[in-house]
Amino acid sequence: MIPLKLLFKNKFIVLVGFMGAGKTSLGRGLSKKLNLPHIDTDYEIEKIKNMKISNIFEFYGENYFRELEQDTIINIISKNKSSIISLGGGSFLNIKLREYIKNKCISIWINVNIDIIYKRINNSQNIRPIFSKMKSKRDLEILLNKRNLIYKEADIKIDSGKLNKSRLVEKVLHKINKYLENNNENC
Ligand code: S3P
């Protein structure tokens, strides 16, 4: 079931959620299924600076990264047509970005529990500066719980759990269709 309305409207599907939630992987899956372009905002930032995110943090600091993140995401949304966008884990915490996204996009929060997140981040090749600074899983959990209070402002919540990728894509499409049915005037 493909939400056809999406194909005709200038709408973005924006995936939000914590580090390791699977935003990039799900974004690719949705992009394939809906035949819409996929944009990973961290990857775009890395291309702009020709540096890995971890190096941007190291050499310029987090504030600089956050400003670049804000400009890059607003630029992407203002210049592109209907597409699937995977954000970095901190992007939706920025109030300006959050309001911008809520206005122009359908936001989807990929909610994953701490055990899965911790395992994924630990096994990942991707260096995550926010995680590198932490001492324990408990620190990560505290940040996750704090951020979840903001992620939950997204239009749609998906509990991803242990679903495989194709089941997850189906679940998301189902929820998008339901959302479009109930929010006709906004989309
Ligand atoms: C961040 C998450 C990262 C990346 C940066 C900051 C965060 O993206 O944007 O390291 O603040 O949670 P992922 O969510 O893809 O790991």
Image (cartoon, rainbow, N blue to C red):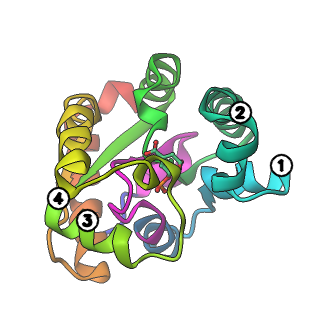
Q: Which mark is residue 118?
A: 3
Range covered by the magenta-colored residues: 4-25
Alpha-carbon distance for marks 4 and 3? 6 Å
In front: label 3 or label 2: 3
> Is 14 covered by the magenta stretch?
yes
Q: Are marks 4 and 3 in contact (CB under 8 Å)?
A: yes
Taking the spot 85% from the left edge, 56% from the top edge, the residue there is 50
Using the image as rendered, state which of residue 33 and residue 96 is in the foreground. 96
Q: Which residue is mark 4?
A: 114
Which amino acid type is marked by label 1?
Ile
Alpha-carbon distance for marks 1 and 3? 29 Å
Q: Is 35 positioned to the left or the right of 69 in the image?
A: left
**Which of the two labelled residues, at mark 3 and mark 2, occupies the earlier sequence position?**
2
Which amino acid type is marked by label 4?
Ile
Q: Which mark is residue 48?
A: 1
Alpha-carbon distance for marks 1 and 4? 32 Å
Q: Are marks 1 and 2 in contact (CB under 8 Å)?
A: yes
In this view, 20 is above or below 154: below
Mark 4 CB near ligand 1 (8 Å cut): no
Query: Regarding mark 2 in the picture, which secondary structure is present there?
Result: helix
Q: Which residue is mark 2?
A: 68
Which amino acid type is marked by label 3?
Tyr
